[in-house]
Image (spheres, grey):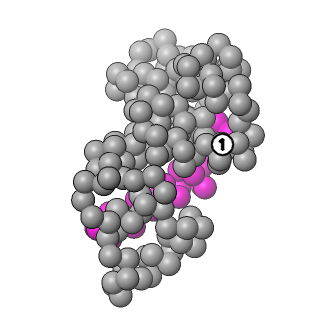
Amino acid sequence: MARIDYADITKPETQPLVARIQRERASLPNLYKMLLNSPPIAEGWLNYLTAVRQKSSLPPQLREMLILRVAVLNEADYEFEQHLPIALKEGCTAQQIEALKANDLDALDEKSRAALSYCNEMTRDIRVKQDTFASLREVYNDREIVEITATIGAYNMVSRFLEAIQVDHE
């Protein structure tokens, strides 16, 4: 059970933002119902996560693997459950998903392994070792590195918000 109440989404002042979230997300997930307690935060969140998920140049499969790995590392079940169908739709295999759960990076290709090693260190340790970054640098360009880093950072923010407030599953 959530630690605070979900926002009243019937308030006239939040209706345009509620409509926008529903349009862009095809629903109004509990995460956004919680965020709407602060409309400016909900709007900023929506803009940032839309950029990460829909405007990035990263392959969608890699993006979703990063998101799922962050969810596993942070024990954020809501985040994992929300992104599992998206990951499958974007081409993630059952084997890849099991590898993400088990931290079996050897089961992944070189580029994915480099990004997910980076994800592990960024999420667990904050500071990334030079050799881990060098491996990432060998297979990704500057834009991709920024987008990988922003994706990992964004979904660490999501999982921390979800778990701190204990947002309910749909």
Viewer-proximal residue among 86 and 59: 86
Report if residue 121 is visible in the image: yes
Question: Is residue 131 rendered to the left or right of residue 11?
Answer: right
Report if residue 154 is visible in the image: no
Quick check: 127 above or below 51?
A: above
Residue plotted at (41% across, 58% down): 31
Q: Position of residue 52 (x, y in %)?
A: 53, 50
Question: Is residue 155 rendered to the left or right of residue 116?
Answer: left
Q: Let me know if residue 61 is in the magenta part.
A: yes
Q: Residue furthest bottom?
A: 12
| Residue type beneath disc 1 | Ala
Residue plotted at (60% across, 55% down): 55
Question: Dot 1 lies on which element?
Answer: helix
Q: Which residue is mark 1?
A: 87
- Residue numbers of the magenta segment: 37-62
Viewer-proximal residue among 141 and 136: 136
